[in-house]
Structure formats: C-alpha cells, structure tokens
Image: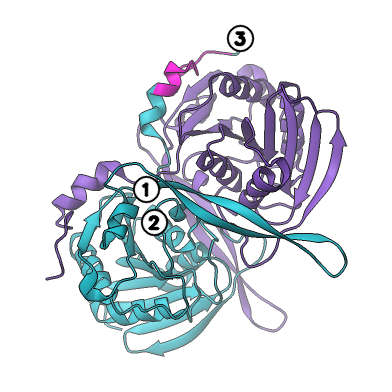
Chain colours: A cyan, B purple
Amino acid sequence: MTTSRPLILITNDDGIEAPGLRYLVEAVKDLGNVVVVAPEKGMSGMSHAITVREPLRVKKVREQEGLLEYSCTGTPVDAVKLGERLILKRRPDLLLSGINHGSNASVNVVYSGTMAAVIEGCIDGIPSIGYSLLDYSHHADFSACGAWVRRVAGHVLEHGLPHGICLNVNIPALPMEQIRGMKICRQADGAWEETFDVRQDPYDQEYFWLTGRFNERSNGGDTDLVALREGYVSVVPTHYDLTAHHALQRLVALGLPSDGNGLE
Amino acid sequence: MTTSRPLILITNDDGIEAPGLRYLVEAVKDLGNVVVVAPEKGMSGMSHAITVREPLRVKKVREQEGLLEYSCTGTPVDAVKLGERLILKRRPDLLLSGINHGSNASVNVVYSGTMAAVIEGCIDGIPSIGYSLLDYSHHADFSACGAWVRRVAGHVLEHGLPHGICLNVNIPALPMEQIRGMKICRQADGAWEETFDVRQDPYDQEYFWLTGRFNERSNGGDTDLVALREGYVSVVPTHYDLTAHHALQRLVALGLPSDGNGLE
C-alpha cells in the first residue's frame, strides 16, 4: 500500500459478508486504502459490548491492491480495538461502520453495534461515521446510498470532526431521485415496547423470545425521525458524554447536595 | 405483597449471586417491595446488548415476604425488559442496578452493563439509579456503601427524577468515615488504551486477550474522576440522548448542509 492515501478502517455489526458492508467498501475504496475488520457473524443489538471472558481470534480473508479484509470473533467494538491496536498499529484517518441493515435513528443508537463501533472510534480520536439504511432486509437495495456515503465521508476526510463528535447517518429506503437532501438533526425521543413471545420447549419448560415495537415520542420538528419521514438523509452529531448537562442544576434544586455535605 | 409500598426492581451485571447485588438488596429492602431480576452469570462489559438470536429463560430463585428473586439468561438490559414486561407487568417505582464491582465513572459508563440496565429503565420512564464501588474484587468491602445507596434511593423515591434523566453513582473504596460527602458531577473524558495479550493455542493458532489501561483526559475540576479522587461519592445525571447538541451549529459551519440541498 502507498502511505499517502488516507487509511480507512471499516467495520459493521451485520458481519463481514453482509451486503451493506460490501456496498460500503465499494462506495469508498477509491477514497483511500481500506482495511476491513468485521465480526465473522451477525452481531446486531450488541451495542458497546466487549469480550473479556473469552479470547478473540482474527483471520485474514481478502487481500488486494488497496484493500485488506479481516474477520474476527467478538463484537463490533472488539473489531475496532483489534483493527486499531493489533492490525493497523496506528490510528486510521477515518472509521466507517455499516451500512447497517435497518434504522439506527432515535433511541436505536443505544442498542446499535454499528454505532457502538463508531463511538469507540470517536473515543479514540478517529473521525468516525456510521451509516444505516432504513430497510432490515438482507436483500435491501443499497443503490441510493453510495452518493450520500461518499459525500459525508469525503467531507469528513477533508475537514475532520470536532473532538468527541461522531456522525450517525441514516438513509431513507427510497429510490435515489426521491431523496430530498440531507439534514443535521437531533436524536428523536422514543422507546421500544417489548412483548415476550412465550413458548414451551419439548421438555415442558418455558422460554421467551424478545419482540417489540417502536413508539416515537414526539419532540419537535428537528429530529432524525422527522427528517427521514420527509425523505431526507439524517445526520446526528453524536457523542459519548452521557452527562445530562441541562440537569446538573436541576438536581441541585431537587435537593441532592452538590457540595461536600456529609450524611445526616 | 402489600401494594402500598413502593415497588423496586433490582438488577446488576455481575450476576445474581454477586456480593454487590446482595448488599444492595439488604440496603434497600425496607424501602419497598423488592423484585430482583438479574443475569444468572456475570455479564460485565455487555453494555446495552440485547438478546435477539436466542430465546431467554427465567427462573424464580427466592421468595420471601417483600422480596422476590429471579435469575435469567441474557444481558442486564434483557433482565430489565423481562422484569418490566414479563414478571412485574407494570412499571416499578424505582429501578436500582449494582452495586457494581468496579468503577463506572468517566467513559466506563459506555461499556457498563450496570449502567445500561439503568439507562434502559430511564428510556421506559422509570426513576433509575446505578451504583458502583471502586473495587473490582469479588471480596470488596461494601460496608461504606449502604448509607449512600439509601440516601440517593430514598431521595429519588420521594422526589422522582426529570424525564429522561437517570443517575450514575460511584462510591470511592474508602472506609465510611473517610468519605467526605457527595458531589453532582460531569462525566470525565478518557479512553481505554488496549493492548492484546497474544498467545498460541495447542494447535499453533494465535488468540488474543483484550487488556488495557485507562487514560484520563483532564477536562476540568467538576468531573466524576476528580470528585472520587478527592474522596467524594460522585453522582452524574445521565441521559440516553447522544446528540452532541453543542455541535449542531458547528457542523453547519463545517459545511455539512443543514437543509434540503441535493447532491451536487
């Protein structure tokens, strides 16, 4: 590999053979030297989990001009750590994750392995972007994504991102000509309402499948869910500082002491 | 159970038999009716992972006046979902998680199963508190924790918490009389710097253990890490809105369009 081209680390949470990852690699491979380090199998819903009770394994699966690919055991965040510290041994210029099969808008970002990988890169000071297409199907049509993926990645390669900020990019499942543009948004409020599908195993023991549906909590016109419904690509600047800064004073007002009061 | 007492759901990420959980149950059981739903084994570092590729199982393990306990397969967040939707079938008045064996201050909150359970409760509108003691040992001395645990839990039972806010409480590993008080803090900036411990299996294949050390990035005197070092219990108001609100305008300034610009 030449060293003057940007070094781009790519991962995902749907596994190294997922169509969304293949599409992402194709979309950006002429922007730099690409190294893929991705879970060997699907890791949806793994959030920011790391593997500490088992060792990890890595396998080189592809090598061609400007493109190296490794699969690994473990989670998307493990993949980023292995990529940075074991394989690249230097900080890449850009970390991309996805393209996720399904939405990571609103509170989905909290459960997402795709976005956890992005946040991990961000913690380590790498300009990092996660991409998701609002179509959960394995056979989703990613053809409208390429131009948007390249536009955001190219912008970030050129301008960088502020410290501690990464991007959560969601793309509506629409034909290219129906996508109206891109909007910088807030994360919409919402929650998953679970129901458990109760079954009996052949030995008369109950087991439970987690299922659920998403409930949006309307909170303004500038959220990612609103933008996506209106046909825009949503871009949420995302950070790993979970402090509710606006609540610091409010807690004091509620009577929780903010100074060195001992126990009464 | 009587129904007039508050209903308190308790979970953790170190597993139902962890001393920290036992200590938490003892500390709060006279504040209400307690239902424990906790992973059957240790789930440290699982963050906000949920189990979607396998079914879950639940087992009642203890039943006494005012205290019911269930163990489950799956993650801490699964435990909260099972507790709310399958076991309690109503929203508890308070969700407590911990006491974690080890720090969840600074960026540890992102990896923490203890705090993920708390954030899950928060998403569902339950006043939720996570407790951690800065001692990773299984034999940690939790005796200084009880008074602080009860103080924060009692306060939240009485006053509630603002929508979308939960609490991340860390307790220094000090004798009770050396703890100077409690401080409401920001999450400190920092990152884990990994090294991989490389080994060979008996079949000459390499495998890698994830290890690392934490690097604090100094960012002011009002952080949780500073408070803990000074001998205070730290309380960080925490939320699940990962939007970097302060960066919304900055991204526009960087040239990412905030309106409906199409692709050039």
Say which residue label 1 marks. Answer: A188
Give the residues drawn in magenta, as a range: A250-262
Is residue B221 visible to the viewer in this orientation of the structure?
no
Residue type at tag 1 = Ala
In the foreground, A94 or A213: A213
| Residue A99 location (% of width, % of height) | 38, 71
Tag 2–tag 3 contact (CB < 8 Å): no
Q: CA distance from mark 2 to mark 3?
A: 45 Å
Quadrant of the snapshot with the C terminus of chain B = bottom left
Q: Amino acid at mark 2?
A: Ala
Q: Earlier in the sequence, mark 2 or mark 3?
A: 2
Where A117 sits versus B9, above or below?
A: below
The three-letter amino acid code for the residue at tag 3 is Glu
Look at the picture and state if B175 lies above or below A22: above
Numbered circles on residues, count: 3
Looking at this view, name the residue that lies furthest to the left: B264
Q: Position of residue B70 (x, y in %)?
A: 78, 45
The numbered mark at residue A105 is 2
| Residue labelled with disc 3 | A264
Disc 3 from disc 1: Cα separation: 41 Å
Spot occupied by residue B17 in the image (x, y as percentages of width and height): 79, 44
Pointers 1 and 2 in contact (C-beta within 8 Å):
yes
Mark 3 or mark 1: name the one nearer the start of the chain. Answer: 1
Q: Pointer 1 indicates a residue of which chain?
A: A
Q: What secondary structure is marked by label 2?
A: loop
Q: Residue furthest bottom?
A: A64
Q: CA distance from mark 1 to mark 2?
A: 7 Å
Q: Residue at x 60, y 13 (%)?
A: A263
Q: Can marks 3 and 1 be said to lie on one chain?
A: yes
User: Against B119, is A95 above or below?
Assistant: below
Q: Could you say whether the residue bearing mark 3 is in a helix, strand or loop?
A: loop
